[in-house]
Amino acid sequence: MTVALDLPIARYQFELAARTPLSFPAYAGSTWRGAFGKALRGAVCVTRQPECGGCLLQRNCVYSLVFETPAGAEPLLSKGNAAPRPYLLHPLSTSGQTYQAGETLRIQLTLFGRALEHLPYLIHSIQQMGQQGVGAKQGRFDLVAIWFEKKLGADDWVPVYLKVEGRLQPPLSAQVVLPAAPEAVRLRFKTAFRAQHDGRFMHESVFDLTSFMMGLVRRLSLLSAYHGQERLTVDFKALRTQAQALVAEAAEFKRFEWTRYSSRQQCLIGMDGLLGQFSLTGAEWQVFWPWLWWGQWVHVGKGVVMGQGQYQLEDVA
């Protein structure tokens, strides 16, 4: 099966200069997400309603589109799940770090589809984050520069905004070149993968490859339906049958323990997941190669907007 995924993707790095001391927890994903959502809502909400539900502007609001995407009538969301958000934050470079005034740091933001059209609002929100404060010490920062990755995954970054110039280049989507599938591949999680199998969260001794694969297919299909150029035509039944025939070889996993505080629920929430790796060999797995390759940039599982479920693919010689 060939996956013709027409989903514009742009990866940006934001270079920040600390104005006051900044301190981040061992995993900073929730910290950045919470500050980002608060700043974005404050920047664009004109009604000042406490909740987005029932707002007449909900389907035309940048905050709603990006941070609380309405579910709509997509068949894959028949159980009432929330639609996937068209962004990812990447917290690893700041996790567990402390910065003094004058030091620089970088965070990365990935945008999908229609979210690219709203880049100026998102940049303004990050500037507002710097004014309002972020992290345990509510540290403040200035936005110094923004870098854009020209080719997806190439680590080739070019400046699109410099504070000293004050001009932003028009939003771009990265050049995408799907490479040929290798004979064998190793998948290594860079951040914790959190997902359920048979109603329970997977742990280090229970990893279900079929659930992983179908979760990835579902996520990419929903991103395409909500934020891409067109809806994918996917034979989920056939793919599930093919996934059930695969074996995760040389699998090694360990638990990553993490809790985050939910201001909405006023309590700590467990976000434990899996770190580790596994390999796929033989011809059977290659039908999933396009899904796996795209998945590197969209992540998989729960908590993806906070950076969870990120993995990289490595050729197995």
Image (cartoon, grey):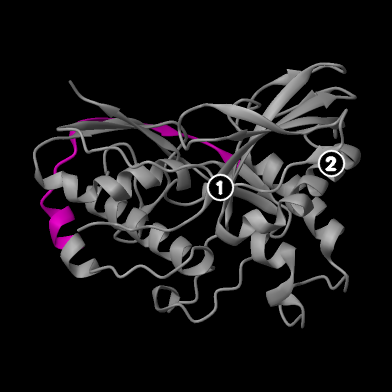
Query: Residue under circle 1?
Result: 173
**Crowding near pointer 1: few (<14 within 10 Å), some, many (20+)?**
some
**Quadrant of residue 145 within the rendered picture:** top right
Residue 274 coordinates in the image, percent (x, y): 39, 37
Q: Position of residue 292 (x, y in %)?
A: 31, 45
* Residue displayed at 44% across by 74% down: 77
Q: Is residue 309 visible?
A: no
- Given this view, does label 1 or label 2 mark the residue nearer the observer? 1
Residue 252 in magenta stretch: yes
Give the quarter of the image for residue 114: bottom right
For residue 245, side relative to residue 297 (left or right): left
Residue occupying the point 49% across, 82% down: 73
For residue 127, the mark is 2
Q: Quadrant of the C terminus?
A: top left
Disc 2, SS: helix
**Residue 8 badge:** none
In the rendered image, residue 258, in percent from the top left (x then y), is placed at 55, 37
Which of these two is toward me, 37 or 285?
A: 285
- The stretch of residues the image draws in magenta is 240-259
Give the spatial CA distance, label 1 vs label 2: 22 Å
**Quadrant, the N terminus:** bottom left
Q: Amino acid at mark 1?
A: Ser
Specify whether residue 142 is in view: yes
The image position of residue 245, as x and y in percent, is 10, 51
Answer with left or right where residue 134 lies relative to residue 67: right
x 47%, y 38%: residue: 152
- Numbered-mark total: 2
Q: Residue at x 84, y 24 (%)?
A: 18
Tell me the amino acid under the disc marked 2.
Answer: Gln
Label 1: state its secondary structure.
Answer: loop
